[in-house]
């Protein structure tokens, strides 16, 4: 479906066909259709002949979770078999066609749950798989099974991993004979650093928990923007074609992969790369300049515009953010916009039904002054999503998506709280009202502290009308059981302290919250000291201890332990920072000894967490890799300290040793880091 047709059809669709709750029907209801009775199977599962991978996967989920919930194991048969009695038809079966089960008006991975003639049909829009990725695209039948398990059986997938699901026990499962429900999601995809799928970067949606919580791609999309690296790689082309690359300070250079925007072969290579991606089966493909863009200074490029950030910076010493919000708005890099519009138009001639995603980021954060519209089948991929930017782009493209840094651990908030439920709800509801089709968001490392917020993000991307307080309460009850009371108080205090110490302006409604708004004088240690005063830490410690006593099951105890692990990090870091300040104010032997002891306690903690066995972290510590990378980063560049896989990174770090390593990725205002007192030499007497 063309993007403009899709947008027109979906403008009111979500409100008209919102995800409708389905209730299980009492067994004594004469209109109820039984699927499981007294822990025995009553129904048979029917799948299409030669069912595709994801339909088989969905039927497997159904068998597994019905067994966990009721103890009954339902049989699965393939057409042309036609089982007698009650049937659960999964996917696009012949029976669904014969009974007129239609999916008209559905989009993304929308689905239907319909009962007709003693058959429960679970079916949705299915269009998954490209030549390179089998989990990208619509898997509506998976969504239908998930909706059945959530709404009828009460299953929830609160956290990633094998222990993140809560499965209520039932002896019987029934559905209403007249059931006919459509399940919709508000956004087409959520891209980002998804720990739902074994900590892979930018490819969510393989796991059941990811799909259930809307961290998936229901369109065949390759978002992300920085396509110059793949299309015109300096490693591949610079030696033989230096003319493809930027002139900087009088010399062509491949360093940084900066391109000459006016070279016709650069345009050709970008077009060829984009067409190749579409031919691999993708429907939406991103186009955008390299990260850290630096303009080409050749005469032809310089005549295209008045974009001169480097000159402005040398003259004023000002930061990029100041330039972006003042000068850039009036002098955007038209050389980039002209090039990108030419690529868009060239590709449209051969692939008219495909959608281009235009990266609106850094130099291209504000739209062109020259180009009135980039095309109906062009989506603006905004990395600045506050209202000024949204309004500036709204009439320049056919649709909008967003990329936000709300939880990025590379940025100033680091391993800490990042957002509160209220703030998340305010921003996601704004983006939905503003017509955003998708959002790239990255719940990374601190599930023990931000689990309710991460879960809330996923649920709101499915249904932005949900009440955030209710979602958080459901999370705590589901995850912690009888320990939910103290854990709700634990999270609520963390949220209050975050808003009190590092406030964000709600008027700046969809900006990247704290990660781009932290005051420059609020370094990481100062932030911890202000958020986690002795009084606050005492209250938090009390609630964690109470939760540890109240948790009953292995599952509940495991998730309380995760919160304990990450609370201990806050407590030990803050104590270490407090002792460091005390010693700096009065450098005497007694305070040096106290500081040495607090650093040793933290080092013991760091050693323990980094050395958790994989079987533990896979089961009970989502985001462990990202958490540990920050713990041992040693101020190294993110290319090494963040983007290198954790098994390799861990081996290298342990070989060198943990003691004395700083934390965080750098010392500029863009990062969160702690250097001293970790880097002090405690083998010597007090200085």
Image (cartoon, rainbow, N blue to C red):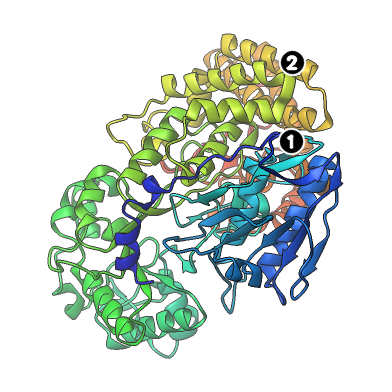
As drawn, which residue projects farthest toward the bottom?
240
Residue beneath the point at 58% across and 79% down: 131
Residue 2 in view in this figure: yes
Return the residue nearer the eye: 248 or 19: 19
Residue underneath mark 2: 545
In the foreground, 341 or 502: 341
Label 1 and label 2: CA atoms lie apart by 42 Å
Give the structural element (helix, strand or loop) at label 1. Answer: loop
Mark toward the start of the polypeptide (1 vs 2): 1
In this view, 29 is above or below 141: above
In depth, the one of 589 and 296 nearer the eye is 296
Question: In the picture, which quadrant includes the N terminus?
Answer: bottom left
Residue at the outermost front position: 30
Q: How many marks?
A: 2
593 horizontally vs 224: left or right: right
* Residue at the (53%, 49%) spot, across then down: 181
Give the residue at x 70% y 40%.
153
Q: Is residue 561 above or below residue 298?
A: above
SS for dot 2: helix
Residue 586 rendering spot, x and y as whole percentages: 56, 12
| Residue 346 x %, y % | 29, 84
Q: Please name the residue that numbered disc 1 is placed on.
A: 27
Q: Is residue 604 left or right of residue 297?
A: right
- In percent of width and height, residue 506 lies at 32, 30
Say which of 152 and 190 sits in front: 152
Q: Residues within 10 Å of mark 2 (few under 14, many from 20)?
A: some
Q: Quadrant of the C terminus?
A: top right
Residue 414 position in % (x across, y down): 53, 38
Instruction: Answer yes or no: is residue 687 visible.
Output: no
């Amino acid at each position: 479906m063309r993007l403009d047709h899709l947008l027109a059809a979906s403008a009111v669709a979500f409100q008209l066909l919102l995800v409708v709750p389905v209730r299980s029907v009492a067994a004594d209801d004469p209109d109820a259709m039984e699927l499981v009775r007294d822990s025995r199977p009553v129904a048979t599962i029917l799948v299409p002949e030669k069912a595709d991978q994801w339909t088989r996967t969905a039927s497997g989920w159904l068998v597994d979770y019905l067994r966990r919930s009721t103890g009954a194991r339902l049989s699965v048969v393939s057409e042309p078999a036609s089982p007698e009695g009650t049937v659960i038809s999964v996917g696009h079966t012949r029976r669904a066609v014969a009974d007129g089960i239609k999916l008209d008006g559905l989009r993304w991975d929308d689905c239907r749950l319909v009962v007709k003639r003693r058959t429960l049909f679970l079916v949705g829009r299915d269009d998954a798989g490209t030549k390179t990725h089998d989990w990208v695209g619509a898997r509506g039948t998976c969504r239908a099974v998930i909706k059945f398990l959530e709404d009828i059986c009460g299953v929830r997938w609160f956290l990633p991993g094998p222990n993140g699901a809560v499965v209520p026990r039932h002896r019987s499962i029934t559905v209403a004979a007249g059931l006919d429900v459509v399940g919709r999601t508000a956004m087409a995809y959520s891209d980002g650093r998804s720990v739902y799928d074994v900590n892979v970067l930018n490819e969510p949606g393989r796991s059941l928990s990811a799909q259930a919580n809307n961290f998936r791609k229901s369109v065949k999309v390759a978002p992300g923007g920085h396509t110059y690296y793949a299309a015109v790689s300096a490693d591949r082309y610079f030696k033989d074609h230096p003319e493809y690359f930027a002139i900087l300070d009088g010399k062509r250079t491949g360093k940084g992969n900066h391109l000459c925007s006016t070279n016709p072969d650069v345009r050709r290579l970008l077009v060829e790369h984009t067409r190749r991606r579409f031919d691999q089966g993708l429907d939406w493909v991103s186009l955008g300049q390299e990260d850290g863009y630096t303009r080409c200074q050749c005469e032809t490029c310089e005549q295209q515009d008045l974009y001169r950030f480097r000159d402005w910076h040398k003259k004023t010493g000002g930061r990029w953010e100041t330039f972006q919000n003042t000068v850039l708005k009036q002098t955007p890099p038209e050389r980039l916009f002209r090039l990108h519009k030419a690529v868009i138009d060239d590709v449209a001639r051969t692939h008219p039904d495909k959608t281009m995603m235009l990266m609106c980021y850094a130099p291209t954060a504000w739209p062109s002054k020259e180009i009135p519209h980039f095309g109906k089948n062009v989506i603006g991929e905004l990395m600045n999503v506050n209202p000024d930017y949204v309004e500036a782009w709204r009439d320049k493209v056919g649709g909008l998506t967003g990329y936000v840094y709300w939880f990025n651990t590379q940025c100033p908030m680091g391993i800490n709280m990042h957002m509160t439920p209220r703030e998340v709800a305010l921003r996601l509801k704004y983006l939905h009202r503003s017509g955003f089709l998708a959002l790239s968001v990255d719940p990374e490392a601190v599930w023990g502290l931000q689990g309710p917020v991460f879960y809330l993000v996923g649920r709101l991307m499915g249904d932005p009308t949900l009440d955030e307080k209710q979602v958080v309460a459901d999370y705590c009850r589901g995850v912690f059981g009888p320990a939910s009371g103290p854990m709700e108080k634990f999270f609520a205090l963390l949220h209050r302290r975050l808003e009190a110490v590092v406030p964000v302006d709600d008027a700046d409604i969809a900006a990247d919250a704290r990660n781009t708004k932290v005051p420059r004088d609020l370094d990481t240690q100062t932030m911890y000291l202000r958020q986690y005063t002795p009084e606050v830490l005492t209250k938090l410690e009390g609630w964690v201890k109470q939760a540890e006593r109240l948790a009953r099951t292995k599952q509940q105890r495991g998730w309380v332990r995760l919160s304990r692990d990450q609370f201990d990090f806050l407590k030990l870091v803050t104590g270490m920072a407090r002792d460091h300040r005390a010693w700096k104010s009065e450098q005497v032997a007694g305070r040096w000894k106290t500081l040495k002891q607090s650093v040793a306690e933290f080092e013991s903690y760091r050693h323990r967490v980094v050395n958790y066995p994989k079987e533990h972290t896979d089961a009970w510590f989502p985001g462990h890799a990202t958490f540990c990378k920050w713990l041992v980063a040693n101020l190294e560049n993110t290319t090494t300290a963040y983007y290198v896989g954790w098994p390799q990174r861990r081996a290298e770090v342990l070989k060198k040793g943990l003691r004395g390593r700083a934390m965080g990725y750098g010392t500029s205002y863009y990062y969160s880091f702690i250097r001293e007192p970790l880097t002090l030499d405690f083998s010597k007497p007090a200085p």
